[in-house]
Image (spheres, rainbow, N blue to C red):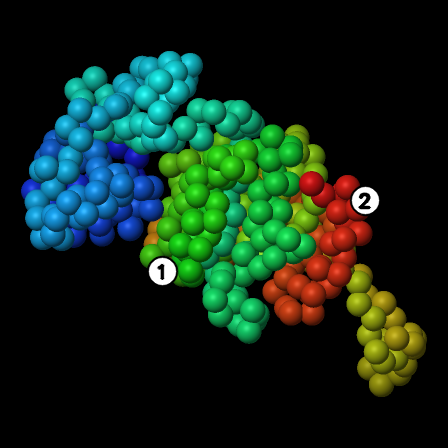
């Protein structure tokens, strides 16, 4: 038996609901549609936000039952329906979403026109972690989430999506929490950006890895994870190929970071000075916030608990799983500090002019 997709729970209503209850589900589901089912989860009908608006304009109240608002003969498809047949239904019926039922009429999925009309792309999903508070940029992120800060004319999140799309990775999962509605309203289902977007809603902050567990049902192939406040024109296809070729459990994207010590540095042996370097430059590899993971690694992430991706990496190392290093030679910037955000915007015209980033 095929199980119903977990995130459909927020879209389900029952025939004895009131219009107020339907509005609540429409708000929580953020799809513009709710699915009316019976106790066995068989599809009964559908209600859109437009249906509710029209009912209220006709004089219905929020406490009225929904029986006169339901579309009792909804357009739907069955599990066995081919992609081409589904595409034809979308075009002929002029709908944007289609419920999917099994042989017994039980609801199992809801697909959008975006999933059919956007090219299938590569199998590897991209998880963008966009649920953070952006506390280090609080003067800039008081009204919007950090991934929506603009670089040039577009949000940094849009640049990230565009970069993955140009390499054929168009299955996008965005974890959201702080001011999630701003991100959802801007990108919607991703159709306008040539990708298919699903939102993974964190009801509480889960760290840079905790939210990955919520997306488990979509992560059946090796996948990317990228922090929502990272800007890079990294060739992500090369990184995934490296990850697969080396049979890594996790591949960490790294970046060379150099800084100059503003003082003379002594190398000593006890009380004797062996060497003096005047203001040496130190080079090290830092974690870039870009990763490739095998789907099995999700089982190492505790469910519904705050968990950083560094915790996951350390767990893998403790279990002697192979963790790879992929050094990023392309442009990279983490905008966690205001000076870095301003530097990125200063750098961006040159990046765009050189067509290093699309």
Q: Residue at x 64, y 69 (%)?
A: 338
Q: Position of residue 166 (x, y in %)?
A: 64, 34
Q: Is residue 103 left or right of residue 250?
A: left
Please, is residue 285 above or below residue 107 in the view? below
Q: Could you say which is closer to the camera, residue 206 or residue 195?
A: 195
Q: Which residue is mark 1?
A: 204
Q: Position of residue 352 (x, y in %)?
A: 75, 47
Q: Which residue is mark 2?
A: 354
Q: Could you say which is closer to the camera, residue 352 or residue 105?
A: 352
- The quarter of the picture where residue 122 lies is top right
Q: Could you say which is closer to the camera, residue 167 or residue 60?
A: 60
Q: Is residue 26 left or right of residue 307?
A: left
Mark 2 or mark 1, whichever is nearer to me: 2
How many labels sit on residues? 2
Q: Residues within 10 Å of mark 2 (few under 14, many from 20)?
A: few
Where the C terminus falls, by quadrant? top right
Q: Residue at x 33, y 15 (%)?
A: 81
Q: Residue at x 80, y 63 (%)?
A: 258
Q: Residues within 10 Å of mark 1 (few under 14, many from 20)?
A: some
Q: Residue at x 46, y 52 (%)?
A: 183
Please, is residue 58 above or below residue 341 in the view? above
Q: Earlier in the sequence, mark 2 or mark 1?
A: 1
Note whether residue 287 is visible: no
Gap in angstroms between the C-alphas marked 2 and 1: 41 Å
Residue lying farthest to the bottom in this orientation: 271
Residue lying farthest to the front in this orientation: 58
Note whether residue 104 is visible: yes
- The quarter of the picture where residue 94 lies is top left
Please, is residue 167 above or below residue 156 in the view? above
Badge 1 element:
loop
Are discs 2 and 1 less than 8 Å apart at CB? Answer: no
């Amino acid at each position: 038996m095929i199980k119903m997709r977990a995130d459909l729970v927020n879209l389900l209503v029952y025939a004895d609901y009131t219009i107020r209850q339907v509005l609540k589900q429409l708000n929580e589901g953020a799809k513009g549609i709710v699915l009316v089912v019976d106790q066995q989860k068989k599809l009964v009908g559908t209600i859109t936000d437009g249906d509710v608006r029209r009912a209220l304009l006709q004089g219905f109240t929020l406490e009225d039952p929904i029986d006169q608002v339901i579309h009792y003969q909804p357009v739907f498809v069955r599990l066995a329906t081919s992609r081409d047949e589904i595409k034809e239904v979308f075009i002929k019926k002029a709908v944007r979403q289609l419920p999917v039922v099994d042989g017994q009429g039980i609801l199992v999925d809801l697909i959008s026109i975006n999933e059919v009309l956007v090219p299938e792309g590569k199998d590897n999903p991209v998880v963008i972690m966009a649920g953070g508070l952006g506390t280090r940029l609080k003067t800039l992120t008081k009204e919007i989430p950090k991934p929506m800060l603009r670089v040039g004319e577009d949000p940094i999140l849009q640049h990230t999506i565009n970069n993955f799309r140009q390499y054929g990775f168009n299955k996008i999962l965005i974890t959201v929490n702080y001011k999630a509605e701003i991100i959802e309203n801007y990108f919607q289902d991703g159709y306008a950006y040539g990708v298919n977007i699903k939102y993974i809603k964190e009801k509480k902050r889960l760290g840079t890895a905790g939210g990955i567990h919520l997306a488990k049902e979509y992560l059946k192939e090796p996948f990317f994870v990228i922090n929502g406040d990272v800007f890079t024109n990294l060739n992500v296809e090369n990184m995934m190929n490296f990850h697969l070729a080396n049979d890594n459990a996790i591949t960490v994207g790294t970046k060379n970071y150099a800084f100059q010590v503003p003082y003379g540095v002594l190398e000593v042996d006890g009380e004797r000075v062996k060497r003096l370097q005047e203001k040496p430059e130190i080079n090290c590899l830092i974690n870039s916030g870009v990763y490739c993971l095998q789907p099995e690694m999700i089982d190492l992430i505790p469910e519904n608990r705050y968990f950083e991706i560094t915790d996951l990496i350390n767990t893998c190392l403790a279990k002697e799983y192979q963790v790879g290093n992929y050094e990023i030679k392309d442009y990279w910037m983490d905008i966690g500090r205001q000076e870095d955000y301003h530097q990125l915007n200063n750098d961006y015209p040159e990046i765009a002019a050189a067509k290093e980033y699309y």
